[in-house]
Image (cartoon, rainbow, N blue to C red):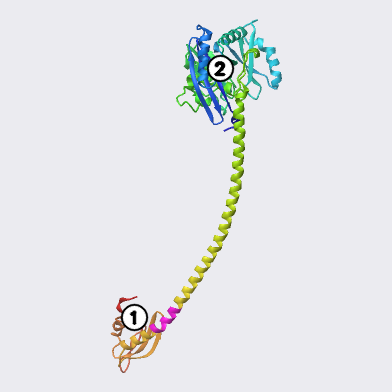
Amino acid sequence: MEMRSWLAFGTGAGIEIQGGDLLVTVSRVRPKGITVLGQTVIANFRDRPAAEWGAEYDSFLRAHGAGYLSATLVLPRRDVIVRLVQLPGVADKDLPAAIGYQVDSLHPWGEDEIEFAWQRVSTRGAVMVGMVRRETVLALAERFGEAGVSLAAFTFSAGALHGGARLLSQPPKEGFFLALEARGESEIYGESPSRPVFTAAFDLPLERAAALAVSELRLEPGTAPANPAQILPPPLLPADFDLSRSRTSYAASLAGACPRLARAANLLPAAYRSGNSRTMYLPAIALSLVLGLCATGLFVYKVYTDKQYAAELEQEVTELRARNRRVTELDKELGETKQRIETLDAFRSRTRLDMDALAELTRLLPPPIFANSLQVSRDSVIVAGEAEQAAPLLQVIDSSPHFHQSAFAVSLVHSANGELFRIRALRQKPPAPGGQP
C-alpha cells in the first residue's frame, strides 16, 4: 500500500449522463479499500419535472446516509473536447494563463464562450485540457439547480478515469486502454509511455476503435482492452458490482470522495460549485486521534512488557544453563565412576578366570601327560609338554567350555617316551552355572 493511500478518506457521489438517464454511484473510500454504498439510474431526467427526479435523487442519497454530498457530474463525451498540451517548465500557478493564451486554438467553436479546465498528466509538462461550451454548462447547472441537486464539479470521462486510476495505486507503466461501446459510439481512454493520455469517441465498431487506439498509443499489436478492475481500484463491496458498466460514474464518485488524491479537471464555474461540509470529517478526525493515542499506548505498553518478559526469560535461561552444566558434570562423573567399577570388576574376575583355566588344563591333561611350560594371556593359552599321543589333545582341549580353536603351534617332535607338543588355544568365557549370565 502506498503512503498516499493512508490519506484516502471520504465519501463521494458521481453522476454520469447516459443519453436521457443519469447513472448515480455513491462510494466510500478508506485506506483499506472502497465500498460502493449504492447505485441507481434516474430515467428520462431531461423530460421529467426537475422537482420530481430531484426528489428521487435526494431520497437515494439519504437512504445511504449521503444527503450532504455535492456530486461530481461527468459530461457527455460528445459535448467535451479534450486536448493534450505540452507545457514543460510551466509552474502550476502559471498554467491557467499559459493555457488561456492558446485555448482558442484548441477548439472548433469559434467565438462561442467556453469553459476549460486542466490537469497534469505527466511530470514532463503534459497537460490534459478539457473544453465545453459555456451555454452547455450553464444549462445543465440550471437544470440540476432546479432539481435541488448540489454539484461540486463538472468533469469529463478522461479526467475522472485518470484521477481514479491513481487513488490507491498506479496504473500499469507499460500502457493500457479502456473501451466502451454505447448508443452506437465507441469511446476509448488509454495511457502509454509514448502518450500520457489518449481519449477519443469513434463512430466505429468497438474492434476497429480498439485497433486505432493501439496504434495511437504505440502498444503491442493485438493488445486487448484492459479490464476496468485492473485500472480503477475495484470496490470491496458489493462483490457483484459491474465496474465495466459503471466505470465512469464510479471514477467520478472517487474524485468527489478524495478530490486531492483523485483529481479531476473541474469545468463548473466557481459560482455554481457547492462544497461538501467539512464538519462531517470532525468525528472521523476525533476518532482517528483517539485511535492513534490508543495505538501509541498499546505500542509503548507492548515494548515495556516485551522488555520485562525478555529479562525474565534471560534470568531463567541463566539458571537453567547453570543447572544444565551441573547435570552434565554429574553425568560425566557418573560415567567415569561406572568405568572404574567395570575396570575393577574386570581385574577382579581375571584371577578367577586364570585359575579356572589352569584347573581345566590340569583336568584335561592327566598323567602320564605332563606339561613343562604354560603361558596364559587374556585371550589364549600356550601349553607345551609330552604325551604318548599328542594329536587327540586338540579335540580334548576344544571340548572344554574354556577353550576353542586349539592348534599345534609347532610340529610334533617324537621323543623316547612319546611326542613333544606345543598347543595354542583361544580362551572363551564358560557359561555360568544354571544358564545365568
Residue at label 1?
403
Image location (x, y in percent) of residue 413:
34, 88
Disc 1, SS: strand
Instruction: State the extent of the magenta-drawn residues as a range.
Output: 344-353
Name the amino acid type tagged 2: Ser
The answer to whether 274 is drawn above or below residue 340 in the figure is: above
Q: Helix or strand or loop: what does disc 2 sit on?
A: helix
Residue nearer the viewer, 379 or 300: 300
Q: Earlier in the sequence, mark 2 or mark 1?
A: 2
Image quarter for residue 399? Answer: bottom left
Residue 139 versus residue 403: which sits nearer the camera?
139
- Residue 6, x across and y down, in percent: 59, 31
Quadrant, the C terminus = bottom left
Pointer 1 local density, CA inside 10 Å: few below 14, some 14–19, many at least 20 = many
> Is residue 144 covered in magenta?
no
Residue 148 in picture, x, y percent from top left = 56, 12
In the displayed structure, 415 sits above or below 431; it is below
The three-letter code of the residue at mark 1 reads: Phe
